[in-house]
Every structure is written in structure tokens, then in C-alpha cells.
Image (cartoon, rainbow, N blue to C red):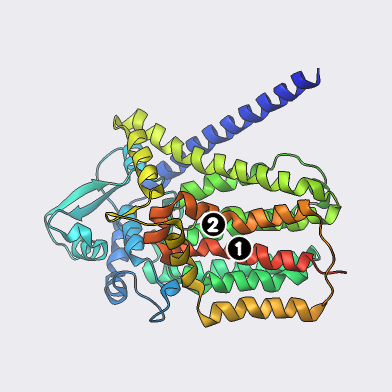
Amino acid sequence: MGNENAVKEIGKQIKKILIILALGGALGLALLMLVYAIPTERMIYNARASVELIEDLGVNPQLISGYQATTLDTYTDTWMLRIAFYNGEESLLQKSLNNYNYGYGDGRSNSICESVVAYLNGMEGYQRYSYARYWHGYLVFLKPLLFFFDYGDIMGILKFVQLFLVVFCCVLLERNKLTKCIPAFLAACICVEFHTIGLSMQYSGVFVTALLSSIWILKREDREFQDLSVDFVFLVTGMCTSFLDFLTYPVFTLGIPLTMMLLRRSVFGWKWRLPLSALLDSFYWGLGYGGMWSMKWILCTIFTGENMIADGIHSVLYRSGADVMGKDVSYLEVLWENIRMICKYPYVLAILGVIIYILLNKPHFHKIKKEVLIAWLFVVCIPFLWYAVSKNHSYIHAFMAYRDLGVSVFAGLCFLTQLKKE
């Protein structure tokens, strides 16, 4: 009888997951069709007003020379802009699924910034391209913003929104009697170059998703953390990450909220369940992330006639492989390429400063159960596990992918605070 009930419960959970994924795909497509209905004339006008800024910034400039962690991804930002202001005559469904954009076939398409500037300056000879592999869900926000503001204005708005979310997270940590974890959170923000993130649309989707998910967790009632119920917030967070992001530092949206979840659940004394909780939440995040991405491929294959499933699988295999421009890179090479991004004095000092603060605050540690240790070590290791399955991407794009290490910084420092004897 017990086994039958367990099977029924698993069946119910699977049904819920499939329904949420299907609804997520339908909602995502509906939202994209809605914003594609917005006239593009003013978007093109505001994009033209951004040409000087795009030319001044160039391709992926470093805000501080020698600090690769401060690299802006203007290359991808201009991709986003040219997809946002595309003004072809296709149906809303076709635009939403194929994510058309204009470029040039004479080599200019290799330099997206140059290609966008050329188009906005009226250069002839452009061609239509498609970028259907990703959802491009950022368009739900970018298109309305570009209707009213130029690229520089949008940067300013993103900076304000992200600063507000960081402050709000600190306030909620204090309200949940987790004030001792605020320095750890701020150190993680410093290490992921929080002020740089606000200057890049490409980086912002993951950061905002992670903080919104964390805020939702921090605002929940205490009683909601007293059992091991399935947390669909991680399923939805994974889906939102896949919907909004290209492929930047996605497990940041898993690790930061998961650390918040462990902090909340540690209060109730059911230490032995923490590892299971962390594994379940991560599993559901993975289902949301992979499931939502797959939904885009399935919808494209059904409605466009192109085998986007095969294209998507090929892309995943390539980005997870070890081949980088004909050379096989090892896991250790990938790891070092990312770690060295934060091996700079400001980031190291931020981490050491929090460690010293913890030691000086209360120098006495207490023993910790191995179950709790396993749970925290799992969260700390999430970025390292991700690098193992995304070698190509994590090596080539280490200037953005290193931000996954913000999870290790935050979780590791929070773990030290949990060792403190009250």
C-alpha cells in the first residue's frame, strides 16, 4: 500500500512538472508575440541614438585594463538590440520563434557591433538571419524599454534595478535574523563585478533572476520551511533562466537562491534532511532549465519545419565538449581560466575581509553534523560541477562564466557563519 501511494505521488509530481513546463512554454511564446506586436519605428530611432555609444565602447571593452572580470559583453548586447528592432513582415509567430535580425554577408556579420552600426547608418546590402536556438525572452523587457529609451538609458535603468534588488536582499536577510550573512552576500556581489553587470544587458538577466528568486525565498513564512515539500520555485527559476539568458553564468540562479534556502531551513533543526533538500532543489532547477530550453526547440520544429531539436542538441554537445578551436582543453585548464578572473586584490581582499570579520566577531567554532557539511559542500561545488559539463563555453567565455564562482564565495562564507557558536 505504501509503495502504491509513493508511485501515485511521484506520478502527480511528474504531471505537475509537465504542466508547468507546457504552461511556461506557452506563456513564453505568448509574451514574445505580444512584444513583437509593438511598432519598431521608435525602437530603431532609439537604437540610432545609441550608435555613438556603441562605437565608443567597441567590442567587449574592459572597464579596468588588465581586469578581465570587468569585460562588458557589448558583442552580445548589440545582438540583442538588432533582434529587438527587427522590422520584417513575417507573422508574429514566425518572428517570435525564429528571432530574425539583419546583418551583412561580406564579413561584417563577424563583427556584430560594426554590423549593427552599418545597418542603423543606412548601409545597403543587409540580409536576414535567424537566431532561433535560444528563447530570447529578454525581448519581453527590452522591446518596451527600447521603445522609450536608448541603450545608455537602459544601462542606467538596469543599474538602478539591480542596486535596489541587492539592498532589498540585505534588508530581508536582516529581517530573517541572518544579518551575519550580509557581508558574505556583499562579498559575492563584489567578486562577480556587480557594477559591471549593470552595464551589460547580457549579464543582467541571470543576476536579476537569481535575486528575485532569493527574495521570494526570504519573504516566505517560517512554517513553509518545516517540511521537505517539493520547491517548485527552483523549477520556475530554472525555466526563467533558460527563457532570459543566452549562456552566461546560469548556475548562479541555482546556487544563490539555494544558499538562501539552506540558511532558512537550517533554523529548524532537521539537519539530516539538508543534503536531500539541496539535491531535490537542484534537480528541479535542472528540469526547469533543460525543459524550458527543449520547449523552444520543440515549438520551432513544429511550427517552422526546421529541425531545431537536432541543432540544439548539436550546440549543447559542442559547448559541453573539450574542443576549443581545434585544441582539447583539460578540466584543470578550464578551472584555472575561471578562477584567475578573481585572483585580483579587490576580490581576494573582499573575501579575506569577510573571513576576518567572522573570526573576530565570535572566534569559537562548534562541531557540525556531517549531513550539514555535505549540503554546504554540495552548493559550494556547484560551479565546479558546471565547468566540468560546459568546458568549451566556460573556457572561451571565462570573462563571464567565472561569475558562477560567486555561488562558491557566498555559500562558502555563509557556511563559515554557520560554524559559529552562538
* Mark 2 → mark 1, Cα distance in angstroms: 9 Å
Q: Earlier in the sequence, mark 2 or mark 1?
A: 2
Q: Amino acid at mark 1?
A: Ser
Left/right placement of residue 36 relative to residue 340 reads: left
Left/right placement of residue 417 relative to residue 65 reads: right
Q: Position of residue 68 (x, y in %)?
A: 41, 73
> Farthest residue toward the right?
422
Residue corresponding to mark 2: 384
Q: Nearer the viewer, residue 45 or 1?
A: 1
Vertical comparison of 359 with 380: above or below? below
Left/right placement of residue 63 relative to residue 194 reads: left
Picture residue at 54% right of the left edge, 52% below the top: 385
Q: Nearer the viewer, mark 2 or mark 1?
A: 2
Q: Secondary structure at mark 1?
A: helix
Vertical comparison of 182 with 92: above or below? below
Q: Residues within 10 Å of mark 2 (few under 14, many from 20)?
A: some
Q: Position of residue 258 (x, y in %)?
A: 66, 54
**Residue 90: quadrant of the picture:** top left
Picture residue at 55% right of the left edge, 67% below the top: 162
Picture residue at 55% right of the left edge, 72% below the top: 191
Residue corresponding to mark 1: 408
